[in-house]
Image: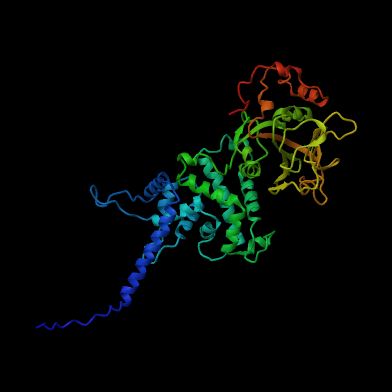
Amino acid sequence: MYALVRLKPASTPEEPSPTRFHHLLEKMGNVESSSHYQKHLSRFLPDEQADIDSVFVAISGSGEAVGGKGGKPAKRDVTLTMLKAHVKEALPESMVVRLYNGMKSIPLSEKSPGSNGQVRKEQFVIFMSAVFKGNAEEKKGIVMKMISNTDSTVKGSHIIEFAEDLVGSVVHVLSCRKMLKGWNLKNVQNSTTGIKALASQLVSELKSADGKRLEGGQALDAVCDESSIEDWVFRVPQVSAFLTVVVQQGLLILHSLPDQEQETFPLLPECQGVRGSRFVSLLNIPSVTYINSHLPSELQHKWRLLFASQVHGESFTQLCGHIVNQGPCVLVLKDTDGYVFGGFSSCSWVVKPQFQGNNGCFLFSVSPSLEVFTYTGYNDHYMYLNHGQQTMPNGLGMGGQHEYFGLWIDSNYGRGHSKAKPRCTTYNSPQLSAKENFTLDAMEVWAVGDLPESAAGTGQKSILDADPEAQALLEMIGKGRKSDGLRDPADGDGGDN
């Protein structure tokens, strides 16, 4: 006989209580948050991850044991006071506060303690990921909070303040870390006006929430949202580049690793050829940075002073003798009204009664405003240098046409013009000088990039090298130097470190 067995009725699954359901969601949120964190962490190489970790420990003191020796390492968050203590004098205090607000803006899951006004390690890592590896979309929220820590939209006036703070912090930290690459602050103009000019130039590319370009006084009251900031960061690479420098050098993070040694965006070129304190450039650090960013990438690493009127004298013959056949150059002029402007010649200057150069040339203004004016395609009147001709204009010019140049220095040194009504045909530049016909106050010329082979092969072996005027005169009458073929090989590139 079979025994009857009473079977238990099948149990129905328990209905999760509201509390358990809430904990389940929190757990899922933590997994999602952890996954998001790991995604950002994986952007960095192991050495980079270790460097980021060590900097966070140094700032927060997380490596210190709790309860003396043998205790577990403390897990601490970063406070503003800690960040200021770590940065010390490397950055202005206002920028340290902005960086802290940017870090705090990184969202965390509800369960993660991060709303106590401090920065968690996850936020620190994700912030670094956005700054060093992120695109404009990833950076927009951080930049928004760095501009204003309270609003979802920001005013144009706040953006201008942020831009000035950002540019000023770059100059400050490069000077503090002794990274000016040979540019001595005693040999350049004061950076205060340059900081404001460069900040204004950066903000001029900004569009308000309704898509309009900000111009003049209306820029101060314009309202910008996250999409405006994203568009700005995307179209103006200097914003990201400057922020990277501020974070990297201010916090001394990811600055000494082998693959970080080569700058992807060289801000300052190496300065060569300046001797003593007699020479003071017409440029300041921000304007050098801005002009350099518009040069071809292969020319951005080095500037070498060729001619300065305050050193070599006010002579057109001296000017020609120092700049002919020296490769691409940056010319900077100052008129007696204080306007500073100039041009970039993409090829070596050659004395001849024809236009020369190519569409890589451009004109620029430094003061009262900072701006670059590039090739329009209208004509090929890029650059011109001539002397001693009776039928052709004698002088140095860029853009426009004979007697109507965008930039002109007469062979009768000291006089010049910038004619553009309404604009220079070659470069679309306005009148660069205060007056159409101006008096030259000072001038300097920098060779950019490496010395061309034609110049590198000439050592100081000829008496003509010691007399640029004689050399220039021969060039002007079409006589080459017969002794060049008899020279000894050059010892180096002729630059001054």
Tally of marks = 0
State the residue in front, 350 or 422: 350
Picture quarter with the C terminus: top right
* Residue at x 66%, y 42% (from the top left corner): 295
Q: Position of residue 219 (x, y in %)?
A: 66, 61
Picture quarter with the N terminus: bottom left
Q: Residue lying farthest right?
A: 391
Protein image colouring:
rainbow
Quarter of the image for residue 271 reads top right
Q: Residue lying farthest left?
A: 1
Q: Position of residue 418 (x, y in %)?
A: 80, 44
**Residue 325 drawn above or below residue 8:** above
Give the left or right position of residue 339, taking residue 92 as reference. Answer: right
Q: Position of residue 144 (x, y in %)?
A: 54, 60
**Residue 34 drawn above or below residue 293:** below
The answer to whether residue 120 is visible is yes
* Residue at x 81%, y 31% (from the top left corner): 352
* Residue at x 61%, y 52% (from the top left corner): 236
The answer to whether residue 405 is visible is no
Give the left or right position of residue 359, taking residue 151 as reference. Answer: right
* Residue at x 38%, y 59% (from the top left corner): 34
Give the left or right position of residue 140, taking residue 479 as reference. Answer: left
Give the left or right position of residue 359, taking residue 28 as reference. Answer: right
Q: Position of residue 25 (x, y in %)?
A: 36, 70
State the residue in front, 116 or 137: 137
